[in-house]
Amino acid sequence: MRQGIMILCFLFSGKAWSQTFKLVIEVTDFRSDKGMMGYQVFTKEKKPVAGGFIAIKNKTAKVTLDSLLPGEYGVRVFHDENNNQKLDVNVLKIPKRWWVFRIMQRVKWGRQN
């Protein structure tokens, strides 16, 4: 089975005084529309800044987060197929279901090129 993930980070600085940015997380090619996508965005210091669950439609889930401050962020996503709103793990803390993805993205403020 092929699974796909695409994390897009759009940096907008149209208003110089706002100094906030938008992060778009889009995951494609889920096995099915059953369940939800769980996600968490956290700082380099591992402090959560956003998270939740979103419905999967047409094997795709997309969430947009506004108002992120400049910095480095990590993203975790997983397919919560049984809808219990948690990542099920075995005794070794290895996920029982679909994979977990994590990436650190440095967000700099300034104009997008």
Image: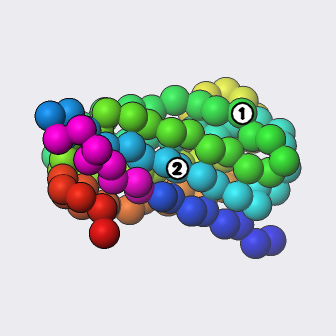
The percent position of residue 50, horizontal first and vertical second, equals 38, 32
SS class of the residue under badge 1? strand
Q: Quadrant of the N terminus?
A: bottom right
Closer-to-camera residue (90/105) = 105
Q: Which residue is mark 2?
A: 25
Q: Is residue 5 above or below residue 52?
A: below
Q: Residue at x 31, y 33 (%)?
A: 67
Which of pointers 2 and 1 lies earlier in the amino acid sequence?
2
Color encoding of the figure? rainbow
Region of the chain picked out in magenta, as a range: 9-16
Closer-to-camera residue (1/62) = 62
Q: Residue at x 71, y 66 (%)?
A: 3
**Secondary structure that dominates the magenta span:** loop
The percent position of residue 14, horizontal first and vertical second, equals 28, 44
Left or right of 104, for residue 24: right
The percent position of residue 100, horizontal first and vertical second, equals 53, 56
Q: Which residue is mark 1?
A: 55
